[in-house]
Image: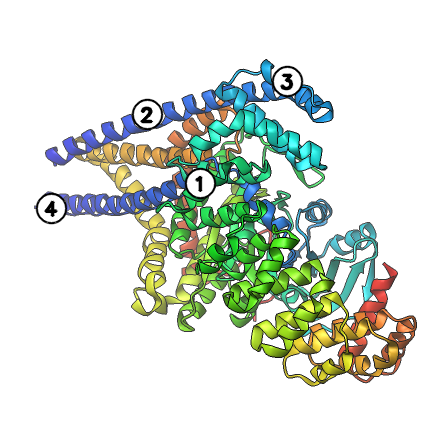
Amino acid sequence: MEQEIKLLQIVSIILFVILLCLLTYLIIRKTVENKQYKKIKERKKQLIGPVFEYFRDGKKIMKKINQTKVERQAMERVLSEFSERIEGEEEEQRLHELAVFYLKDKYVKEIKSRNWSKRMNVLYKIEDFHMQEMERNVISRLHNRNCTSDEKIQIYRILAAFQYEKLWSIINQDEMLSEKNYRSILLRVKTAMFEQFIQSFYYCREELQLAILDVISMKKKIEYLVFLENVFEKYDGEIKLKALKAISSIGYVRNIEDYLYLAKSKVWQERMMIAKLLGTNRDNYIPLLIKLLHDSSWWVRSQAAESIMNFKKGRDILLEIVKHSKDKFAQDMAREWLNKGDN
Amino acid sequence: MVYQWWTTVVQAFALFIAIYMVIIILFYSIILFISMLQLRKEYKLNREDTFEDISNEWYTKPVSIIVPAYNEEAGIIPSVRSLLSIDYPQFEIIVVNDGSKDNTLQKMLEHYEMVKIEKVVRKQIVTKPIKGIYQSKLLPKLYLIDKENGGKADALNVGLNFSHFPYICSLDGDSVLERDAFLKVMKPIMDSSEEVIASSGSIRIANGCTIKNGQVLNIGLTHHPLVIMQIIEYLRAFLMGRIGLSRHNLLLIISGAFGVFSKKWVLKAGGYQTDTVGEDMELVIRIHRLIKESKEKKKIVYVPDPVCWTEVPEEMKFLRRQRRRWHRGLFESLWNHRKLTFNPKYGNIGLISFPYFWIIEFMGPVVEGLGYVYTLIALFFGGIYLEFAILIFLLSCIYGSIFSMAAVLLEEWSLRKYPKVSHIIYLFFYSLTETFWYRPLTVFWRCEGIWQLIRGDKSWGEMSRKGVSK
């Protein structure tokens, strides 16, 4: 027992020392951090005025600033806040100039940092400030062995925002990317580059194909209607469905007759799409919409009701259904859309 | 002779407690280490940047927020107001009035100008009958369902049946969410392309903070000892425990106060179970079981960030009831699924999570209670036993404080919600006192919970949300 007690004593003392160290570290840390935070905040206040003037009339402020850590951080924060608010090419150009002048050296160093979160922060800032000068650094980071998947995705987004010409070939090769990743990359691509993706659609990975169709439907790009109708005709499964979704979000087809068979499809998504398409057509398909309002799927019913409401006599049709239909679910949906009109 | 027999027993007993302590310390140290690695990696990551992309995302998944309310006339209006101002592209709020005896229903109807609507609800889970469905004239995404009393789980199930969106979130009527909490909690679900099917966030204690119009204005620390101890407890539980467990998909608890689930999986699991007091944990275990049994690669995660502020009991009476209930809920969930314990078929859930919850969480208070009894006995024996007991006591006090401070450190690395240096010093001194009063109290209450189990007591105590059990 004696020995055990001795051991316990030693362990207690060691643990107690650890505890004290921990506490001291916490207190020092907090004090230092609070102080620094205060300094940055004060400096930020002083910087906002001159930076704003620079944005407004291009008056130089560069001499007034020393390159210290606090200065740079304050500047970074001021610029970040501005970057969320400003619009217009001239202002963006000025933002970009300031960022390059004050922050480029810092970023060049930090993009190679061993600290993952530091690297990530830099990558986001590079995009926010449109720092095309960093393109080379970004690409070399991409080829680094330790580049994590989060970093890669952000790098692709940056390259997309910079309209980097080899974008298609590098992202199409990367098998780690999901549909969602591709979508967020493609959303940053401008029309000329997007054209490249459309032209090589056939050679794209399936995830990329889906993302391309999605982006078309999000941006409602009517110029790709012919392309979509082709894809709808030639492909199967999810891609066919996505193409149809894009078509229906554009809301217009060359010949609706070609699509009417979808109303009898076994896939509810297809029935929903046709319900949507019919809503933007002439009113001679209303009987078909009424039929779709009695569908077994909630989504199809809801879409059918919405489409019916698009027509002038839509309210009357839905009222009629509320009064006379024997289908409780159809009645319910009609009522819901009638109520929505009230709000 | 008699004396010698006693010494052997006392020594063996001391040894047992010492070994148990070592196991616990080791386990927590490992978890702490995992959490530290994780948080250190994300240290000072500028999170707003990473969320930008989701909030712009056209495809953001819509969420149905279900708020079960039983006698909440005091808090329901501000609570709904805080929900209405959250930053998320598409959501609906479903308040379920679980047969309140006060004016919860009238207050909601008047304040949000709600009108009765006709609606057929698909009964995917059997519940108590619905008395009426209302929709706000001002805010069409706000619904109220009036139903017969059936308990919290039953109310959640009604909300589940009614909800239109693919993700559901259960939220207690008395908590306040930070505006971007949903963006953050949904991020892992969207990032993983739906591999993550449930996700929950940090819960912090609102007592002592200034909250106005459903927004946290100022974060402070109360001077109420019971509340400070609970703050320390929550920091430890969330930052140390859950991050560590979540990293390896071992999470068995998604707090009922704030968690998001994929509706498909909740329905597959049969909704919330109505005859337990721990319906939140029970559901998570059932989903884990389904995942393993269907051999799908799905995950349940905890995100250290999204913050939900909730009020905790300030009085002994209510805290005691809460702890007894929690402990019974823990047992019921573990017992209902006891098949999983040490069952290799269920992977790490069966081999690590379950044994952890049985041995450390459930049996912990019993062993700790015995430890306290031992200290008392040693006082009579005196001499070397006393020395031993005092040392053990001291040791447990120090290591407890170390874990508490480590949790504060993790908080400093991640959320940094407590702004002042004095907050840290406060938390330190309180954590030193834990072993002397707070710990014995909670140990005792949890043992009481076990006693209630043995006697077959099923009450919820004062804040009774339980209706008649089936």
Give SS at disc 1: loop
Residue indicated by mark 3 = A61
Residue A21 has which mark?
Answer: 2
Residue B42 has which mark?
Answer: 1
User: Who is closer to the viewer here, A203 or B25?
Assistant: A203
- Measure the C-alpha gap from mark 4 to mark 2: 47 Å
Residue at figure coordinates x 55%, y 18% from the top left: A39
**Residue B188 appears left or right of A276:** left
- Measure the C-alpha gap from mark 4 to mark 3: 91 Å
- Measure the C-alpha gap from mark 1 to mark 4: 60 Å
Q: Quadrant of the N terminus of chain A?
A: top left
Residue A202, horizontal then vertical, whole percent:
54, 69
Marks 4/3 in contact by CB < 8 Å: the verdict is no
- Measure the C-alpha gap from mark 1 to mark 2: 24 Å
Task: Identify residue type, mark 1.
Answer: Glu
- Chain letter behind tag 4: B
The answer to whether residue A270 of the structure is visible from this angle is: yes
- Same chain letter for marks 1 and 2: no
User: Who is closer to the viewer here, B42 or B343?
Assistant: B42
